[in-house]
Image (cartoon, rainbow, N blue to C red):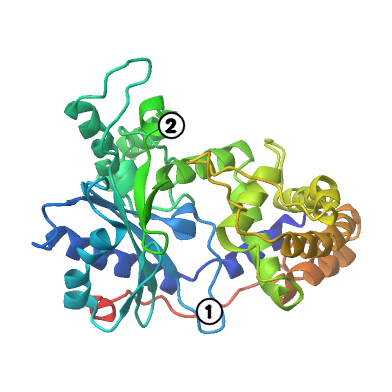
Amino acid sequence: MKLEPQFREFLREIRPTDIQQEDWKAGAKTLRNRLAQDPGLKDILEETFLQGSIRRSTAIRPSGGKRPDVDIVVVTNIDYNQTTPQQAMDRFKPFLDKHYKDKWHPQGRSFGIELSHVDMDLVITALPRTVQVVNERQAASIADRAALANIYRSAAATSFATLEEDTSWRLNPRWQDSRAFSDLDGLNRQLGSVMNEGLKDEVTDLWKNEPLWLPDRDTKTWGRTHPLLQISWTAEKNRNTNKTYLHIVRAIKWWRLEIAEKLPKYPKGYPLEHMVGHLLRDGADLSTAQGIVEVFESFRDKWLLTARSHQVPKLSDHGVPEHNVLARLSAQDFQDFVEIISGFASLARKAFDSPDTAESGKLWKQIFGAKFPLPGPNGGDRPAGHFVKPAAAAVPATSDRFA
């Protein structure tokens, strides 16, 4: 059975808590404000924006003492043809020592910042230096390059709203953050929301083909990255799947966490999310339960023979097609993962097809663990008057937690 009331409650339980969301927003806001105001960076900094699973609304609730993890991208005008990755990242060390002394550490392609309530990844990028205009021979003018920079300064890029918080989000310079409508009266606020919903993603060939450049200290090279295009793809996929894609990704990430000791270390995180998106069909009729069943079965039907042949499929990044998202996944890990998920495909199908709510609930609980609630006696809905006690009282985050 679909057990939609139970899946709604389950998804509430595996999302980051209200307090955790306040923590990452306050930490990210503090970091972005400090970057914007730093005199040592003003000559290179163009803009900052959020990326990662929190922005895409595919993050699950941290457990075992772990903290929310938020990614902040810094867009600069650094000339990557004249600057080494190490030199580019060195530009940010005085800033980090000033504001996050003894709390930051260098990583291959970012800086990690560990605070008491949130972990942050500071990702340094550079705008493309030469922009090739589609169907023209000459390089683009300075105005064309400035147009690319303006996209990263638009509300669509700089908003703190996640895809789940504002389902009207589009990768469009005309998109307005819903908070801009908060001071309007009801009718104008409604018109503003309708205007956002009526926009389309404006992913022009010029912008699509000119991603940001990312320094890699380990390989001593610059590579291409297009995080906004990943966010745009995710938002469109969610719209095309009856707004269930985000739910399905979270559920499968939680399933992986529940049986982590039985699974290989990889795939997890974004590669797993990307695989789910690749396998999940579009459809206005999709429920969360049905989508989970179909993804589990697609792992088995599409990839089991491939895995047993010791091969790993190639899945292109949505933003940079030459990047294979599964490039670092070993054949053995892929086979072990697909073998295990294939077994769960049969269990999920049995849970979905069962006409008995009690039996279906027990089967879903076997898949997702203690967070999945069993159906009540009223045909799968929770009993009348059922109250779910919140995990903790909501407390506004204070700025000194992110010093």
Residue at image position (60%, 53%) is 327
Q: In which image quadrant can residue 269 be found?
A: bottom right
Q: Position of residue 386 (x, y in %)?
A: 66, 72
- What is the CA distance from the residue labelled 1 to the residue labelled 2? 37 Å
Q: Position of residue 191 (x, y in %)?
A: 35, 32
Q: Spot the residue most to the left.
A: 39
Q: In this view, does 272 lie above or below 286?
A: below
Quadrant into which the N terminus falls: bottom right
How many numbered circles does the render carry? Answer: 2
Q: In this view, does 208 lie above or below 80?
A: above
* Residue that badge 2 annotates: 201
Callout 1 secondary element: loop
Amino acid type at image mark 1: Ala
Residue at image position (78%, 51%) is 299
* Residue that badge 1 annotates: 391
Q: Can residue 375 be seen in this view?
A: no
Q: Position of residue 19 (x, y in %)?
A: 42, 74
Q: In this view, does 361 lie to the left or right of 273?
A: right
- Compare marks 1 and 2 and give the one earlier in the sequence: 2
291 or 277: nearer the viewer: 277
Circle 1/circle 2 CB separation < 8 Å: no
Q: Which mark is residue 347?
A: none
Residue at image position (39%, 61%) is 109
150 or 365: nearer the viewer: 150
Callout 2 secondary element: loop
242 or 47: nearer the viewer: 47
Q: Position of residue 59 (x, y in %)?
A: 53, 62
